[in-house]
Amino acid sequence: MKVSLFTAIIVLIVGLYDLAYAYNRRQQNRRRGTIGFMILGIIFTIGGIVMLILHWAK
């Protein structure tokens, strides 16, 4: 599978941004949105790391 380095970095940045957003909102009362952003952040971060590994493992 051919993976672009630019795409992998963007996916990793989006994942880290989602995790930071969920971490900063954890003090508010609305927990449903926070958990959703946490799950998306974890998925995007793991996906970005896997894409980086696939890019370098050609």
Image (cartoon, grey):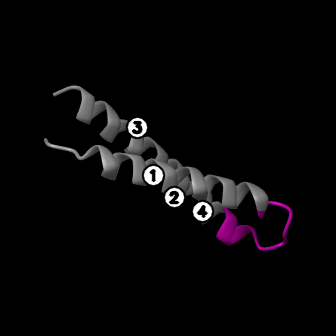
- Distance between the alpha carbons at the discs numbered 2 and 4: 5 Å
Does residue 2 appear to the left or right of 11 in the view shown?
left
Judging from the image, what secondary structure is the residue with disc 3 in? Answer: helix
* Kind of residue at disc 3: Ile
Q: Residue type at mark 2?
A: Leu
Q: Position of residue 3 (x, y in %)?
A: 21, 44
- Image-quadrant location for residue 35: bottom right
Q: Is residue 33 above or below residue 37?
A: below
- Residue 52 drawn above or below residue 31: above
The mark total stands at 4
Disc ID at residue 40: 2
Return the residue nearer the eye: 37 or 11. Answer: 11
Mark 2 → mark 3, Cα distance in angstroms? 14 Å
Q: Secondary structure at mark 2?
A: helix
Distance from Cα at disc 4 to Cα at disc 3: 18 Å
Main SS, magenta region, reads loop
Label 3 – label 1 distance at C-alpha? 9 Å
Q: Are marks 2 and 1 in contact (CB under 8 Å)?
A: yes
- C-alpha gap between disc 2 and disc 1: 6 Å
Specify the quadrant that holds the C terminus.
Answer: top left
Residue 55 or 36: which is nearer the viewer? 55
Q: Which residue is mark 3?
A: 49
